[in-house]
Amino acid sequence: AILPLGESALLVATPLSGLLRLEAGRLEPFSNEAEKFGLASGNVFYAATVLRGGRLALGSSKGLAILNSDGKLDAWIDDSNGLINADVTSLFEDRQGFLWVTTSFGITELLPTSKFMIHDRGSGLRGTVRGAAWNQQKLWVATSEGAFVGKPRVPGPGFVFERVPGVPATE
């Protein structure tokens, strides 16, 4: 993944070399406080996105890092403090500012107020989550056991997921 970093640099997240900074044609290791949370060489990056306000979200095999626009760590979130699983597979910020974090075991919805909502087997999802997308006011999820569609839970917050017929499981 390649994301803007400040006014003139880029943050390059690689599976083998970790975080790198590209500025003025020079590529250097990106050292910051995020390293103490596992964002160092050897960590596997699966997803990255620019959030509202210029913050950066980096999803990896060890969790989710939220960095400010200059690369300073704002938050580290893993399975010990909010994610259903630390293995982040994709990220998506919706129009309301919710950050949807897919993991190997389900989806965590990060609310703009920094609260969490977890979507997993209890809400109908099955298999390893591979990706998610919004379409027609519904949350569509691809997993190793097929495709699922989430409809708002009424009453209450969150979603109820149902398997989409005819979509085969993959391993």
Image (tube, rainbow, N blue to C red):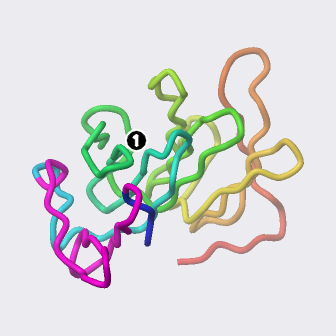
Question: Left or right of 21: which side holds 169?
Answer: right
List x then y, in percent, for residue 8: 39, 65
Question: Which residue range is magenta in the image?
Answer: 6-35
- Looking at the picture, how far across and down is residue 135, in whole percent? 83, 52
Q: Residue at x 18, y 76 (%)?
A: 28
Q: What kind of residue is marked 1?
A: Ile
Residue nearest the observer in this picture, 123 or 84: 84
Looking at the rendered image, the quarter that the N terminus falls into is bottom left
The answer to whether residue 8 is left or right of residue 20 is: right
Q: Residue at x 10, y 50 (%)?
A: 36
The local secondary structure at tag 1 comes to loop
In the orientation shown, which residue stands out farthest toward the right? 136
Residue 84 position by quadrant? top left
**Mark 1 neighbour class, 10 Å CA radius: few under 14, some 14 to 19, many 20 or more:** many
**Residue drawn at 55 percent across, 65 percent down:** 130
| Residue 105 visible to the viewer | yes
- Residue 59 inside the magenta-drawn segment: no
Percent x, y of residue 114 = 45, 25
Q: Which residue is mark 1?
A: 84
User: Relative to 9, does residue 150 appear above or below in the rendering?
Assistant: above
Q: Nearer the viewer, residue 158 or 40?
A: 40
Q: Is residue 1 visible?
A: no
Q: Quadrant of residue 146?
A: bottom right
Q: Is residue 34 magenta?
A: yes
Q: Residue furthest top?
A: 155
List x then y, in percent, for residue 125.
Answer: 61, 48
